[in-house]
Amino acid sequence: MFKQKEGNIKQAKNMLKPGPSGTSKSNKENTGKTNKKRLESEVEVQLDSEFEMEDMDSSEETDLDNHHDLNKYNNVCDDTEEILKKLQNHIEQEEMHWRNELKTKELETEPLKQRQLSRVAT
């Protein structure tokens, strides 16, 4: 893209060079200056529009890259949430399992505690 712009600039400079003409010197100078200014402004407008197009292309690429990254990070967040939910469910199940185990053991030890208390009291 840069070489193309460089070529456009060279082409514009060549267009600005005065060419052979059969007009008088003062008329030639006036016409040359007017043509030169007109061509300079046309080249400037053309180059500005090319730079704007490059900026748009660049910003569109950046937008696409950002959108791609955003989607990737959203997917990572979704996957992480899924894993955390599964982990939370597993923890709750294990917690319930061990509570039940504790209750069962407490029920098993209660008669033993009562027997021990009755031995100590006698």
Image (cartoon, rainbow, N blue to C red):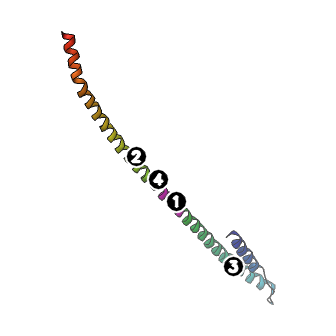
Q: Which residue is mark 2?
A: 84
**Which element type, helix, strand or loop, lies under badge 4?**
helix
Q: Main secondary structure of the magenta part?
A: helix
The residue tagged 3 is 39
Say if mark 4 contacts mark 1, CB within 8 Å. Answer: no
Q: Residue at x 56, y 65 (%)?
A: 61
The quadrant of the image that shows the C terminus is top left
Cα separation between marks 4 and 3:
55 Å
Question: Gap between marks 2 and 3, in whole Å?
Answer: 66 Å
Q: Which residue is mark 1?
A: 66
Which circle's residue, 3 or 1, is located before the other in the chain? 3
- In the visual, does 61 lie left or right of 41? left
Q: Secondary structure at mark 3?
A: helix
In terms of image quadrants, where is residue 92? top left
Circle number at residue 76: 4
Q: Amino acid at mark 1?
A: Asn
The kind of secondary structure element at disc 2 is helix
Q: Please state the horizontal and vertical placement of residue 19, each as a whole percent of the image.
A: 79, 84
Q: Which region shows up in magenta?
A: 64-72
Upstream in the sequence, badge 2 or badge 1? 1
| Residue with the most extreme top position | 122
Task: Classify mark 3: residues with Cα within 10 Å, few (<14), some (14-19) or many (20+).
Answer: some
